[in-house]
Image: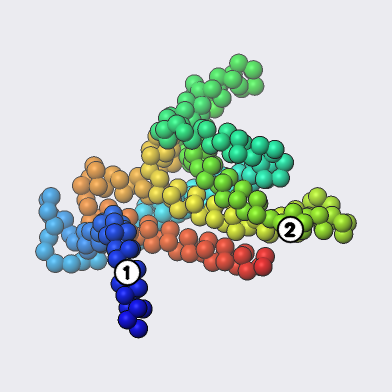
């Protein structure tokens, strides 16, 4: 018992620095957000007492509900597009590429540059006088520039899908790389074609990686405000843009804190569904 207690104290001592860092960088800001969301603001200060009026405003105003829904839909579209594009790339590297490490480096080279530079690059590509419109006009395929390419949810989805592509490719690649090749050989010996082998073996066994990639993409893109600000415009604004505006421009910290916490709870619920799906997929392939 004495040794067990001593080992337990040693264990707590080892994780104490980590817990302190997590408490200061994660738990403390969340606690401050919660406190601020339960206050009412008077000028630049908080009024005495506690209130849930900010949450009533967040949940009761239709414009906020529309923004929450748009944020979820845009993040879901980004997740779907990114995973759909990343899976063939990861499949090629896992099953057909000879120098896999070199291919993985090549796939991540675009992400060595600044995130903002990549967003501005897409703004130039999709712009009214950008690369796409200039090319189509030069080929005579259109008579005037396409206006729907920029400042709408479409441009936000395209830009975010490119920005997070590597975060989808790598977990899917790892999942595909772990597949026992003898299972594919056995299925081939039993008469299964390439498509049937893929649907019966490769895809189910890679689903944990696919769902993991979906979580890695969906959670941060829901709260992204830089990309919607630069390429989305008013039609492509997301809930994070309103939160940022409440803190930096309007100065209504209680409302901004309530919006942030409701958004986090919404994402947490959806992420929980992703985790449940990942566990179900893992059990299904065992």
Marks 1 and 2, the one that precedes in the sequence: 1
Q: Is residue 286 left or right of residue 46?
A: right
- Residue 147 x/y as whole percent: 51, 29
Q: Which SS class for mark 1? A: helix
- Residue 103 x/y as whole percent: 62, 36
For the point 87% across and 56% down, the residue is 189
- Residue 107 x/y as whole percent: 57, 36
For the point 54% across and 22% down, the residue is 131
The quadrant of the rendering that contains the N terminus is bottom left
- Residue 48 x/y as whole percent: 11, 64
Q: Residue furthest bottom?
A: 1
Can you tell which mark lies on residue 237? none
Q: Would you name the residue on which mark 2 appears? A: 201
For the point 30% across and 45% down, the residue is 244
Q: How many marks?
A: 2
Does 35 sit above or below residue 68?
below
Q: Residue furthest top?
A: 138
Q: CA distance from mark 1 to mark 2?
A: 45 Å
Q: Nearer the viewer, residue 14 or 33?
A: 14
For the point 12% across and 53% down, the residue is 45
Q: Is residue 128 left or right of residue 202?
A: left
Q: Nearer the viewer, mark 1 or mark 2?
A: 1
Other residues around mark 2 within 10 Å, as few (<14) / some (14–19) / many (≥20):
some
Can you tell which mark lies on residue 10? 1
């Amino acid at each position: 018992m004495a040794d067990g207690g001593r080992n337990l104290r040693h264990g707590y001592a080892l994780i104490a620095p980590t817990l302190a860092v997590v408490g200061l960088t994660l738990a403390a800001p969340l606690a401050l957000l919660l406190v601020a969301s339960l206050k009412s603001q008077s000028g630049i200060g908080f009024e005495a007492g506690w209130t849930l009026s900010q949450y009533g405003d967040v949940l009761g105003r239709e414009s906020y509900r529309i923004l929450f829904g748009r944020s979820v839909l845009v993040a879901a579209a980004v997740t779907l597009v990114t995973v759909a594009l990343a899976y063939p790339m990861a499949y090629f590297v896992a099953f057909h590429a000879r120098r896999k490490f070199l291919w993985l480096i090549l796939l991540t080279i675009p992400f060595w540059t600044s995130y903002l530079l990549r967003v501005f690059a897409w703004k130039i590509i999709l712009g009214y006088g950008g690369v796409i419109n200039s090319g189509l006009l030069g080929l005579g395929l259109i008579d005037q520039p396409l206006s729907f390419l920029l400042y709408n949810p479409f441009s936000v989805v395209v830009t975010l899908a490119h920005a997070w592509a590597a975060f989808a490719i790598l977990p899917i690649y790892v999942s595909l790389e772990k597949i026992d090749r003898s299972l594919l050989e056995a299925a081939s010996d039993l008469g299964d074609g390439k498509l049937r082998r893929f649907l019966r073996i490769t895809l189910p066994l890679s689903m944990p990686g696919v769902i993991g990639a979906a979580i890695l993409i969906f959670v941060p893109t829901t709260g992204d405000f830089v990309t919607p600000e630069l390429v989305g415009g008013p039609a492509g604004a997301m809930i994070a843009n309103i939160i940022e505006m409440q803190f930096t421009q309007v100065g209504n910290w209680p409302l901004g804190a309530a919006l942030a916490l409701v958004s986090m709870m919404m994402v947490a619920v959806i992420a929980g569904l992703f985790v449940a799906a990942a566990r179900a997929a893992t059990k299904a392939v065992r």
